[in-house]
Image: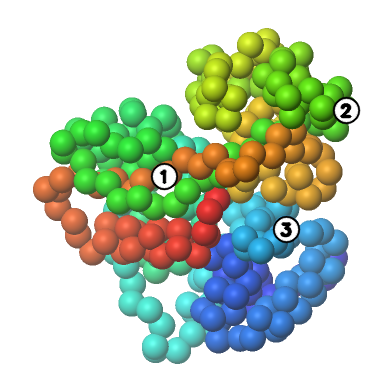
């Protein structure tokens, strides 16, 4: 396989980090058709699709996530080494950052790669929101991307971005749902479908059923696994249905591996918050990370 050029990889990384071809074009000083052309050449060389494009932006495929993880720091390092004296100044210091595994892996950490290339050190902690916020209050974390609105007096939170949730399942199970019954009585129409969940108390699934159908799901839970990427893999393999954020499930929807089972009039959203400790010292490294995450979230739109 031909090794992609630095310019193609640099363009890919900008699209990956911003979540938008137009935003990447603006940051690179290129036209959007030029960015589109470079991405097409890279996809042709790799023999794989890297993004699912829609009006909401560019959602990375699994191949794109792997490529960004493998090439990101190397490309940033080469660009810095070959750049002029006008390169951005180094960012020094250590930031202890917490968040949910999935959004940190797919969105937050890739957005911080340019700062890491400049010398920033990041120590990431994955976990549930409440335990991460407790760590922030106790001083063991500096910054948390929280899936719940923080209530602690010692924490200051800023709304960051909204997650959109979809009820999805494999095609084989989708064919067992009667569309007429689904419109009239969705809970009954879906009740035979086994659930794949993130936790025993069905936090995401339960919230969807209550907001859309007004009650808890009566369905049997077939599988519980504490990673939404594993939930998606199980759903794709036919283990059941689940509720997942759009940014994770978009490639599988585009490829026909799963289908959306229910289409609400208004999409269910959950706001993510960026939280810092009240009164804690905020040095330049923490400020740089906070500003970069906020900037990236503006480019992501709704997740």
Look at the picture and state if 146 lies above or below 283: above
Identity of the residue furthest to the front in this view = 184
The first of marks 1 and 3 along the sequence is: 3
**Dot 2: element:** loop
**Which residue is labeled 3 in the image?**
52
**Dot 1: element:** strand
Residue 193's x, y, as percent? 75, 18
Q: Residue at x 35, y 50 (%)?
A: 159
Residue 284's x, y, as percent? 23, 64
The first of marks 3 and 2 along the sequence is: 3
Instruction: Indicate the quadrant where residue 48 lies.
Output: bottom right
Q: Residue at x 55, y 18 (%)?
A: 215
Separation of residues labelled 1 and 3 (CA atoms): 23 Å
Look at the picture and state if 220 lies above or below 153: above
Residue 269's x, y, as percent? 51, 42
**Which residue is labeled 2 in the image?**
175
Q: Nearer the viewer, mark 3 or mark 2?
A: 2
Q: Is residue 2 left or right of residue 151?
A: right
Q: Are marks 1 and 3 in contact (CB under 8 Å)?
A: no
Look at the picture and state if 128 lies above or below 8: above
- In front here: 267 or 71? 267
- In front here: 176 or 66? 176
**Which residue is labeled 1 in the image?**
272
Q: Is residue 73 visible?
A: no
The first of marks 2 and 1 along the sequence is: 2
Q: Nearer the viewer, mark 2 or mark 1?
A: 2
Q: Are marks 2 and 1 in contact (CB under 8 Å)?
A: no
């Amino acid at each position: 396989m031909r090794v992609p050029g630095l310019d193609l990889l640099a363009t890919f990384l900008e699209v990956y980090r911003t979540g938008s071809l137009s935003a990447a074009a603006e940051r690179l000083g290129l036209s959007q058709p030029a960015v589109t052309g470079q991405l097409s050449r890279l996809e042709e060389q790799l023999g794989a699709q890297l993004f699912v494009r829609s009006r909401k932006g560019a959602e990375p495929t699994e191949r794109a996530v792997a490529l960004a993880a493998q090439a990101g720091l190397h490309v940033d390092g080469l660009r810095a080494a070959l750049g002029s004296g006008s390169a951005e100044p180094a960012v020094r210091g250590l930031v202890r950052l917490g968040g949910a595994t999935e959004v940190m892996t797919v969105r937050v950490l890739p957005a911080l790669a340019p700062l890491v290339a400049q010398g920033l050190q990041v120590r990431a902690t994955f976990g549930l929101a409440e335990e991460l916020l407790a760590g922030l209050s106790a001083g063991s974390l500096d910054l948390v991307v929280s899936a719940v609105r923080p209530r602690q007096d010692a924490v200051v939170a800023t709304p960051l971005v909204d997650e959109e949730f979809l009820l999805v399942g494999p095609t084989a199970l989708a064919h067992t749902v009667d569309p007429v019954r689904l419109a009239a009585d969705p809970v009954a129409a879906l009740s035979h479908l086994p659930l794949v969940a993130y936790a025993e108390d069905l936090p995401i699934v339960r919230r969807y059923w209550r907001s859309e159908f007004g009650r808890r799901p009566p369905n049997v839970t077939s599988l519980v696994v504490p990673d939404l990427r594993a939930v998606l893999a199980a759903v794709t393999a036919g283990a059941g249905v689940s509720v997942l954020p759009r940014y994770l499930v978009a490639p599988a929807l585009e490829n026909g591996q799963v289908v959306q089972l229910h289409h609400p009039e208004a999409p269910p959203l959950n706001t993510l918050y960026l939280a810092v400790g009240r009164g804690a010292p905020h040095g330049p490294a923490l400020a740089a990370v906070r500003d970069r995450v906020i900037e990236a979230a503006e480019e992501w739109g709704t997740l």
